[in-house]
Image: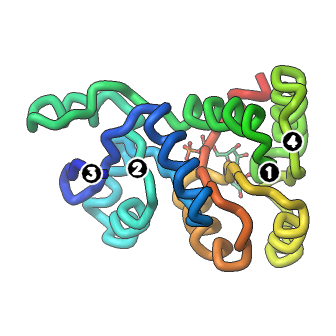
Amino acid sequence: MMKETYLGVDVSPLTYEGILAEVDERISRHEPSTIIAVNPEKIMSAQRDETVKTMINEATFQIPDGVGVLLASKLKGGNIRERVTGVDMMGKLIEHAAKKGYSVFFYGAKEETVSKAVQNFEANYPELQVAGYANGYVQDENALVEQIAASGAQIIFVALGSPKQELWIKRNMPNLPNVMVYQGVGGSFDVYAG
Ligand code: UDP
């Protein structure tokens, strides 16, 4: 996949379907995927802070969340024409997980938010395999990671806000050998709890 680069920040020129197809291929090779949403805010933050730039560019998929990225692509003769938002990518991944039988873990937000979001997903996708969930204010990170590893989760959504969620993912990926998809989703649990 050829990425497009804006002010040093990579963006994946893929639609929702393209990302799901690549994720599946990578799962079949047991290669984990990380998904990060790129918007003008993150691109500007990457100009000020090299570690943010590295964090974004290290992800497997940098989704074009935000019309600014579409405009930049159009102006530079790139191929990105469709917005891929973090919140909708999460919804598509859940639908896909329900279909394929991938087990999903939800980590982040307040207890009542994450539990309500999970309830809503279970109501919409009765076949969805929920490995578990945890609110974003738990203290013992190692215990949580052990819990996630033992849960059999293959996909995890991390909703701690940026860059906290991306740093959490980077730190804990080595201890989650069976989790194949990581998406940092910011305030998306709040959206799906509503
Ligand atoms: N959050 C959390 N633990 C923390 C800090 C934040 O679980 O230590 C949650 C917070 O409850 C909210 C989400 O992370 O649900 C942050 O959403 P926000 O919209 O601020 O993130 P953004 O999309 O702007 O990165």
Mark 1 and 2 residues: CB-CB less than 8 Å, in contact?
no
Q: Between disc 3 and disc 1, whose residue precedes?
A: 3
Label 4 sits on a secondary structure element that is strand
Q: Which residue is mark 2?
A: 62
Give left or right: position of 43 versus 59.
Answer: left
Q: Between disc 4 and disc 3, whose residue precedes?
A: 3
In three-dimensional space, the C-alpha distance between marks 1 and 2, rounded to whole angstroms, equals: 21 Å
Whether label 3 lies within 8 Å of ligand 1 gets the answer no
In three-dimensional space, the C-alpha distance between marks 3 and 1, rounded to whole angstroms, equals: 29 Å
Residue type for callout 1? Phe
Q: Which residue is mark 1?
A: 105
Mark 4 and 3 residues: CB-CB less than 8 Å, in contact?
no
Q: Between disc 1 and disc 2, whose residue precedes?
A: 2
Mark 3 and 2 residues: CB-CB less than 8 Å, in contact?
yes
The residue depicted at 31 percent of the width and 48 percent of the height is: 11
Q: Which residue is mark 4?
A: 129
Residue type for callout 4? Gln
Crowding near pointer 4: few (<14 within 10 Å), some, many (20+)? some
